[in-house]
């Protein structure tokens, strides 16, 4: 897989945990930004997505709001 995966998340977000578990289970390397404690990354997330809700996931240049497992899997080219 040649797409960079980035997730903006918070420690208390259930769907964030589900997304990260999905990535780990499918051996997808990802970068996780904790927007609860990182103000700069929170501002970056809001600027890119226009919202405060998490998770905000980027697969390459494609933004996925929330844990949409089918869309994430399709974008990554893996089985859901």
Image (cartoon, rainbow, N blue to C red):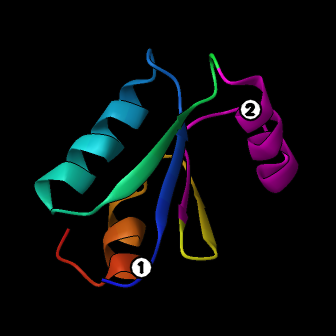
Q: Which of marks 1 and 2 is nearer the N terminus?
A: 2
Determine whether, in the image, residue 7 is placed left or right of residue 75: right
Determine whether, in the image, residue 23 is placed left or right of residue 47: left
Q: What span is in magenta?
A: 38-58
What residue is shown at x 52% (from left), y 24% (from top)? 10
Q: Is residue 50 above or below residue 1?
A: above
> What is the crowding at mark 1: few (fewer than 14 residues within 10 Å), some, or many (at least 20)?
some
In front here: 9 or 33? 33
In front here: 75 or 29? 29
Q: How many marks?
A: 2
The answer to whether residue 67 is seen in the rendering is no
What residue is shown at x 55% (from left), y 76% (from top)? 60
Determine whether, in the image, residue 21 is placed left or right of residue 40: left
Query: Tag 2, which secondary structure?
Result: helix
Residue 75 image label? 1
How far from the left and from the top, in percent, is residue 74?
A: 35, 79
- Inter-mark Cα distance, 1 to 2: 24 Å
Query: Tag 1, which secondary structure?
Result: helix
Q: In which quarter of the image is residue 52?
A: top right
Q: Is residue 46 magenta?
A: yes
In front here: 44 or 16? 44
Residue 42 image label? 2
> What is the crowding at mark 2: few (fewer than 14 residues within 10 Å), some, or many (at least 20)?
many
Q: In this view, does 79 lie above or below 34?
A: below
How far from the left and from the top, in percent, is residue 70?
A: 33, 67
The answer to whether residue 12 is seen in the rendering is yes
How far from the left and from the top, in percent, is residue 42?
A: 74, 32
What residue is shown at x 16% (from left), y 62% (from top)? 27
């Amino acid at each position: 897989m040649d797409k960079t995966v980035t997730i903006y998340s918070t420690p208390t977000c259930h769907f964030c945990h589900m997304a990260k578990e999905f990535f780990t289970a499918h051996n997808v390397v990802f970068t996780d930004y904790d927007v609860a404690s990182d103000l700069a990354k929170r501002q970056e997330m809001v600027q890119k997505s226009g919202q405060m809700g998490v998770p905000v996931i980027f697969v390459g240049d494609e933004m996925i709001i929330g844990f949409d497992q089918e869309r994430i899997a399709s974008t990554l080219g893996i089985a859901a």
